[in-house]
Image (tube, rainbow, N blue to C red):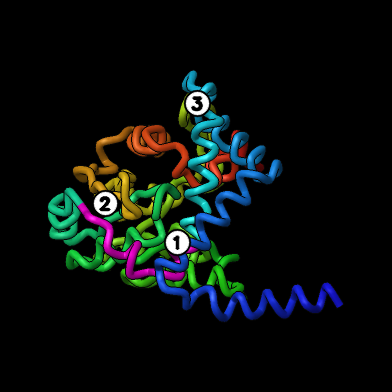
Amino acid sequence: MKTRTRRLLGRIAWLVYPRLPLPLTSLVVELRIRRRLRTPAYVENARAQMHHILDGVGRGEEADDHARDYIARIAWRQALRWHPRVIARQPVTGMEHLRDAHALGRGVLLSFVHHAEFGGMFKSISREGIPVRVMAAAAEMVAPGPKMIQHLSVVGSGGGLISSSEGVAGLERALRAGEVLAVAIDVPGRTALRFAGRDAHCSAGAAVAASRAGAPIVVATSHPGEGIRPTIRLHPAIEPSDFETIDTLMQHLANAHETAVLATPGSAYLPLTSWPASPSG
């Protein structure tokens, strides 16, 4: 009987929660944060995530403080996916860099990592006049549950999605067609680089596609402030041909993202998964 009651309450919650106005959502989020801060498993996981980011740069003593922020950020990210108008209006600086790169007509690779309110980044940029199509993991696009459906809806609202199953060839075709493609580099892969003082392995497929297509790359970083919305910063475009190898290009991109992530490590998304020490994670 207790199990059935819990299931019924859970289904009711799924119907009601996404429809709560933002002030009530804020109250629910704050209560959730307090509960998680009292739950040892949540706290230990958060500490491990922060140590993974901070130990390599000699800031391990900060892990506990940032772990609390990490727990809060996760709770807010989970809630704000149901309020896309909030996260799809992030301020954007450096838009001229993307416009100039796009005007070249060779497509643009927008390089990002899973940091801050990355889900609303692409709609925020597209509101400035340039659609952004985002690569999503193929596994996430097959029979997703309600949370992933909503997440993909928000992520794709700035110009659609492209499945990772398209591979390098599919990304290259889209770039040659003049599209702006957003692809995260902090996903497990076989390209070795250094991030936050650690060895990591990430996917270089998008960088390979940009190199083959001759498409410039614009790095997009997030900079959380005191409010809910972070500021998105678009950096000057780089040309893949300026780098001797894909490995050196990937390291350059990782370095560009590292500064922003280390400024607000609590806003990083699952760093143990995003920045694995080996190709197998």
Q: Which residue is mark 1?
A: 26
Task: Name the foreground residue: 27 vs 49.
Answer: 27
Closer-to-camera residue (109/46): 46
Residue at left 40%, top 68%? 22
User: What range of the chain is rendered magenta?
Assistant: 79-92
**Residue located 47% across and 66% down the image:** 25
Disc on the earlier residue, 2 or 1 = 1
Q: Residues within 10 Å of mark 1 (few under 14, many from 20)?
A: some
Measure the alpha-carbon separation of dots 3 and 2.
42 Å
The answer for how far apart the CA atoms under marks 3 and 1 are is: 27 Å
Q: Quadrant of residue 280?
A: top right
**Tags 3 and 1 in contact by the CB under 8 Å rule?**
no
Task: Please give the residue where the numbered disc 3 appears in the rendered image.
Answer: 62
Q: Secondary structure at mark 1?
A: helix
Q: Position of residue 74 (x, y in %)?
A: 52, 52
Specify the quadrant that holds the C terminus.
top right
Judged from the image, the secondary structure of the residue bearing numbered disc 3 is: helix
Q: Which residue is mark 2?
A: 214
Q: Secondary structure at mark 2?
A: loop
Q: Identify which amino acid the numbered label 2 is placed on.
A: Gly
What kind of residue is marked 1? Ser
Q: Quadrant of the N terminus?
A: bottom right
The kind of residue tagged 3 is Glu
- Circle 3 residues within 10 Å: few <14, some 14–19, many ≥20: some
Residue closest to the eye, 52 or 241: 52
Disc nearer the start of the sequence (3/2): 3
In the rendered structure, does residue 195 fall within the stretch colored magenta?
Answer: no
- Where is 59 relative to 68, above or below? above
